[in-house]
Image: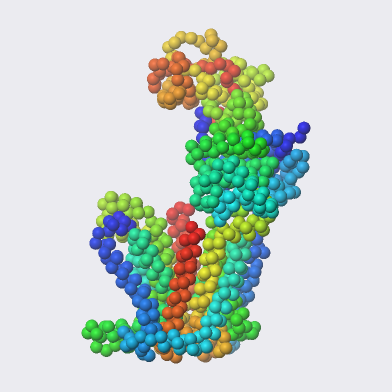
Amino acid sequence: MTPFLDIQNIKKTYGATVAVQDVTLGIGRGEFVTFLGPSGSGKSTTLYVIAGFLDPTEGDVRIQGQSILSVPSHKRNIGMVFQRYTLFPHLTVAENVAFPLRVRRRPNDEIERKVAEMVRLARLETVRDRLPSQLSGGQQQRVALARALVYDPPVLLMDEPLSALDKKLREEIQYEIRRIHQETGVTILYVTHDQEEALRLSDRIAVFSQGRIDQIGTSAELYQNPATRFVAGFVGNSDFLSCRIDRVEGHSARIVLPDGACVSGVRSHGTVRAGSEGTLMLRPERVRIRNAASNTTPSENGAAGLSVTIRDITFLGDNTHFAVETDWKQPMAIRVPFGRAGAEGLAVGDRARVDWVAEDAHVFAESANG
Amino acid sequence: MLLDFDRLGGLKWVLVGIGILVSAFLLLPILFTVALSFGSSQWLLFPPPGWTLRWYEELWADPRWITSTLTSLQCAVLVTLLATGLGLLASFGLVRGRFAGRETVRALFLMPMIMPVIVVAVALYAFFLRIGLGGTLIGFVLAHTVIALPLAITSISNALERFDKAIEDAAILCGASPWEARLRVTIPAIRDGLFGAAVFSFLTSWDEVVIAIFMASPTLQTLPVHIWGTLRQDLTPVVAAASSLLLLFTLAVMLLAAWFRRRST
Amino acid sequence: MSSISIPNRRNAAARPPPVPSSGVSFVLPALLLILAVFILPVVMLLLRSVTEPDPGLQNYRELFESATVARVFVNTFVVSGLVTAIALLIGFPIAWLLVILPKRWADLLFGIVILSMWTNLLARTYAWMVLLQRTGIINKTLMGLGLIDTPLPLVNNLVGVTIGMTYIMLPFIVLPLVTTMRAIEPDLLRAAALCGAGRWEAFRRVLLPLSLPGIAAGGLLTFVMSLGYFVTPSLLGGAGNMMAAELIAQLVQSLLNWGLGGATAFALLVLTLALYAVQLRLLQRGRSQRGG
Ligand SMILES: Nc1ncnc2c1ncn2[C@@H]1O[C@H](COP(=O)(O)OP(=O)(O)OP(=O)(O)O)[C@@H](O)[C@H]1O
Ligand SMILES: [Mg+2]
């Protein structure tokens, strides 16, 4: 079955610069998909191609199997909320929301009804007759959302709509967006560079890097099974250690750390080849730390490990953060949940042992400094 | 501390003193003219020996004052429309356009502002005589539009640059065609700039003397030309009356502008 | 380890808008008007300076050799320089006041400056003609106070021109200065005071240098405008003390000497443009010194 919104091999170049390269993505009706990636990775460019503000150099965009590239923006019937505030400054909240219906020459009673509905949906009753200049940033973006939804567009694009707001307000509106998504069932393409926001909102996340999609999947998939070192670094926190790849069997590899320690059963990703340099990735909360004196060897409990020196300890309430250094001077972070045994009595400057369960370790072909 | 009014000590009173003196310097000639326009002395004695409305009556009775005022108004209104309209188009091109030589064109548009007016006046005088536009209303309007354009374009361009193009894009995505978006969203949003351009253009034409002196014919004179001609003959109090009326008009325009600005914020 | 936050450099604003447009057709009507009713006539006038009465450069030779023309240009420079200097001296404290006065008073002072600027030019010049004449209020007051016995010749000479033009140019000094001084952070002067700078030192070493761009901009604007000013010199000046603009008018209107008139106009034009070029250079240097 063809996806509802089908983005096929989009490429966009500006002279020699490649903004977006070979982006392909199918989105189901009613799905909430987020583009996550650093600044300049091509998220907005992809969105602008869908909105019709940019013509792609190559590729196609289809809605329900129909290419929309030859349809001008104003006939695409797509909703969009922009990163910057884009309310019409001379119109009140209600008039802003009514604008799309007015340009569509809808009858007045229908306009009134739909505007009232949207004002209620976006919780704007108390400000409906104000001008944009009299609204807070959060209110402005809610009006923009109402304006983008009032004409029932099948697809809603949102380009970092909350990036100008402070953290608390952002979370509040994230919640509203989720609610509105559930109530309206609109298909949403959301852009952000904030991983928390992406994890909180989306059904699926597409991680962008340098104009490409590195991986598409649910938050759990991205977290547990990152396809590239970039995704691993971008979604969740990670420790990266340089290593050499010793042997590869299917998706399992044996690696050698710089101190000579051998770790087997590491999950390998991408084109990992034996004999080459690689990067070992660990999640800080999956690593255990204990006093070096306690005399258990890693192989005994099925875990790999190494010796480190503690450089800093920060108590963060529900967990404690250890900054440690390996014997070959690579920094690592370890997070110990409050109440977990083994880490008591550790102090800055102490030697300690860290270890982890083999399948919590991942190895990527790219080097640790890349 | 030099920029904290209350921390200036004695210097504060020196500055305030200068402020009062300069305010007097700026205001007195204007107030003085108003007083003289009601004074009964033909020789502009001050303080006047008595008060009269005679000069206003003379003004009213002389058809040349009335016709030149009407000419000025007509010319200024046409210049306002033309300069604002052309300025709006040109600003769109300058701010949004991407074409070779854009900076040169921008510099060309500003040229009439930095050029000495006398050079423009003499050049246009010769040119209009040659093509038969000397002493015509069209000539006045064209010449004044040229010198009003720089201010109009600056005012509108500034407003257009402050206006976020994404708002227009949003309107287009809402279903408005590009022209509809400009008409219904962009132009209302930059109306302050448009209003400024209109006021500047109007006043430029309304107050313009030098070009008008060269361009005027005995049958077609603007108000400044008529005042000029009168002043060159003698210092009649009728000019004081005319000046006072002009002042009233200026005040009205200023208040209108202030009211408009307050309303739009 | 990688950090949670992602490098978040906003470059969206610096980028050109995503919708491409060409826009030449938009500037075309205004461009045509400027070319036809401005550039063409000015070029034609300048051409006359090398074609009338005979082709050649004799008009420019006359321009440089004539004692009358030399005197006119000296007058023009002296008056323009004086007007600029006086207007700067008066304008600086006014701009300063406008920046620091409590809002109500600042608004009032600002209103006075703007009112004087917007009042009809001829009305203002007329007022000074009346004020400065032999039987005018200024001479009468001075005589009444016993300061002088005979009326001072204040009008029909360069004194009158200087007074009248200073009055007209004052706003053009004040407005750019206010813009510059508004941008000066008051904390800078507080810091200067804490560093031990007294009023005079703080003025000389901080406030004045930081105001310099505004002084330069306003001063140059005033000077250049004064060079080509016509109305006030013709009404307040005397027949024996012409300024450049009056000379041009007289050459073409009364003497019908379009050749020399065009040459004088060209000289004035070159001077004006040269001074603007200097200002542009200063501005650019100031900008690059501030590092962006
Ligand atoms: N008009 C343009 N000309 C040249 N390069 C451009 C243009 N527009 C975008 N780019 C480049 O294309 C790349 C992708 O830009 P895009 O705006 O899609 O990034 P983004 O992922 O949205 O970043 P951000 O998080 O900063 O919004 C960037 O490297 C950018 O510099
Ligand atoms: Mg972007």
Left or right of residue B200: residue C159: left
Left or right of residue A97: residue B29: left
Say above or below: C13 vs C138.
Answer: above
What is the x, y in percent for residue A232?
58, 28
What is the x, y in percent for residue B119?
53, 79
Q: Nearer the viewer, residue C253 or B264?
A: B264
Q: Nearer the viewer, residue A259 or C235?
A: C235
Left or right of residue A121: residue B2: left
Q: Quadrant of residue A150?
A: top right
Kindly tell me whether residue A307 is visible in this rendering: no
Say above or below: B169 vs C218.
Answer: above
What is the x, y in percent for residue A208?
62, 36
Q: Quadrant of residue C54?
A: bottom right
Extreme-left residue of the structure: C146
What is the x, y in percent for residue A201?
59, 33
Identify the residue at image location x=54%, y=56%. Answer: B162
Identify the residue at image location x=45%, y=14%. Answer: A342
Identify the residue at image location x=48%, y=57%. Answer: B265
Say above or below: B31 vs A348.
Answer: below
User: Looking at the rendering, in which quadrant would you find the N terminus of chain B?
Assistant: bottom left
Color theme of the render:
rainbow
Identify the residue at image location x=36%, y=68%. Answer: C91
Q: Quadrant of residue B3?
A: bottom left
Q: Nearer the viewer, residue C103 or B4?
A: C103
